[in-house]
C-alpha cells in the first residue's frame, strides 16, 4: 500500500474530509514524526509502535575490497518496535 | 512524542478541532494496522517503508532457564527509513 492509497482509505472512513484535505493531515502527521525524530525524540504511538534512535558505537572496520582499515564513526540509527496490540493482532489465529 | 502531541500539531498547523484531529489520527493508524494484519506492506514516500515478514518456526532457548523450545512461526514488521529521513538523522550526528 502506498501513501496515496492510504490517504484515499482514510478519507473514505473519515467521511467529512476531501482527499486533498486528508492528504494535508496525513502529510502533517508523518512530517511531525520525522521532525521530532531528527531532533532526537522518541515517538510512542500506543497500540501501533515506537520509533526510537539507537546509538551505534564507533568501530573499526575493513574495506572488503582492499583490506584497508577504516574508522566507522559513532552514529544513530532509527529503530521501530511493533506495539503489543498490533503484534498480537497480526499473530492471532 | 505521542498521539496527543500529533493532535496538537494538527490543531496548530491546520486548524482542525482536537477531536477531529484525534479521530483522523486513530483512523490513519488503524488503517495501517489493518493492512499489516492482512499481510501487506505500507510504503510512505519521504518517510519509510513498513514491511511485513513471515518468520518460520525455529528452535530456540529460554535464555533464563536454558530450556529448549520451539519459537512459533510469526509475522513481524521491519521498518526501513527513507533516504530523506536517514540523512536527516545522520546530519544530527556529530
Image (tube, rainbow, N blue to C red):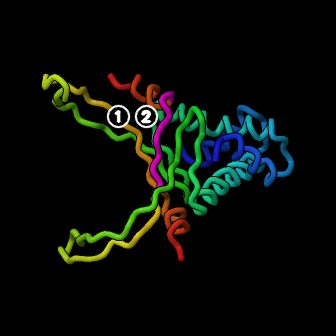
- Where is residue A80? Give x, y as percent: 45, 48
**Vertical placement of residue B1 versus B84, above or below:** below
Q: Main secondary structure of the magenta part?
A: strand
Closer to us: B40 or A33 = B40
Residue occupying the far front of the picture: A65
Q: What residue appears at the point 33 percent right and 71 percent down from the top-left corner?
A: B71
Report the span colored magenta.
B77-84
- Pointer 1 residue: A76
**What subunit carries mark 1?**
A
Please tell me how many numbered marks the rendered image carries: 2
- Residue A4 falls in image quadrant: top right
**What subunit carries mark 2?**
A
- Where is residue A38? Give x, y as percent: 47, 30
In what element is the residue under mark 2? Answer: loop
Q: Are marks 1 and 2 in contact (CB under 8 Å)?
A: yes
Q: What residue appears at the point 31 percent right and 38 percent down from the top-left corner?
A: A55
Disc 1 from disc 2: Cα separation: 9 Å
- Residue A59 falls in image quadrant: top left
Q: What residue appears at the point 72 percent right and 39 percent down from the top-left corner?
A: A25
Q: Quadrant of the C terminus of chain B?
A: top left
**Vertical placement of residue B30 versus A58, above or below:** below
- Where is residue B1? Give x, y as percent: 53, 43
Circle 2 crowding by C-alpha within 10 Å: few under 14, some 14–19, many from 20: some
Q: What residue appears at the point 56 percent right and 51 percent down from the top-left corner?
A: B41
- Where is residue B39? Give x, y as percent: 56, 60
Answer whether residue A6 is magenta in the image.
Answer: no
Do dots 1 and 2 share one subunit? yes
Q: Earlier in the sequence, mark 1 or mark 2?
A: 2
Residue A40's disc is 2
Circle 1 crowding by C-alpha within 10 Å: few under 14, some 14–19, many from 20: some
Amino acid at each position: 500500500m502506498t501513501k496515496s492509497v492510504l490517504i484515499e482509505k482514510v478519507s473514505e472512513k473519515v467521511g467529512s474530509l476531501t482527499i486533498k484535505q486528508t492528504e494535508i493531515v496525513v502529510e502533517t502527521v508523518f512530517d511531525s514524526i520525522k521532525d521530532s525524530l531528527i531532533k532526537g525524540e522518541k515517538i510512542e504511538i500506543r497500540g501501533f509502535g515506537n520509533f526510537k534512535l539507537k546509538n551505534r558505537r564507533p568501530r573499526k572496520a575493513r574495506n572488503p575490497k582492499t583490506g584497508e582499515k577504516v574508522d566507522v564513526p559513532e552514529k544513530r540509527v532509527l529503530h521501530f518496535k511493533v506495539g503489543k496490540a498490533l503484534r498480537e493482532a497480526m499473530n492471532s489465529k | 512524542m505521542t498521539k496527543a502531541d500529533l493532535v496538537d500539531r494538527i490543531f496548530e498547523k491546520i486548524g482542525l478541532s482536537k477531536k477531529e484531529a484525534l479521530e483522523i489520527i486513530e483512523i490513519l493508524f488503524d488503517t495501517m494496522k489493518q493492512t499489516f494484519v492482512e499481510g501487506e506492506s505500507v510504503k510512505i514516500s519521504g518517510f519509510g517503508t513498513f514491511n511485513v515478514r513471515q518468520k518460520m518456526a525455529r528452535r530456540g532457548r529460554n535464555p533464563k532457564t536454558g530450556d529448549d523450545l520451539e519459537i512459533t512461526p510469526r509475522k513481524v514488521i521491519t521498518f526501513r527509513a527513507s533516504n530523506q529521513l536517514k540523512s536527516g538523522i545522520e546530519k544530527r550526528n556529530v
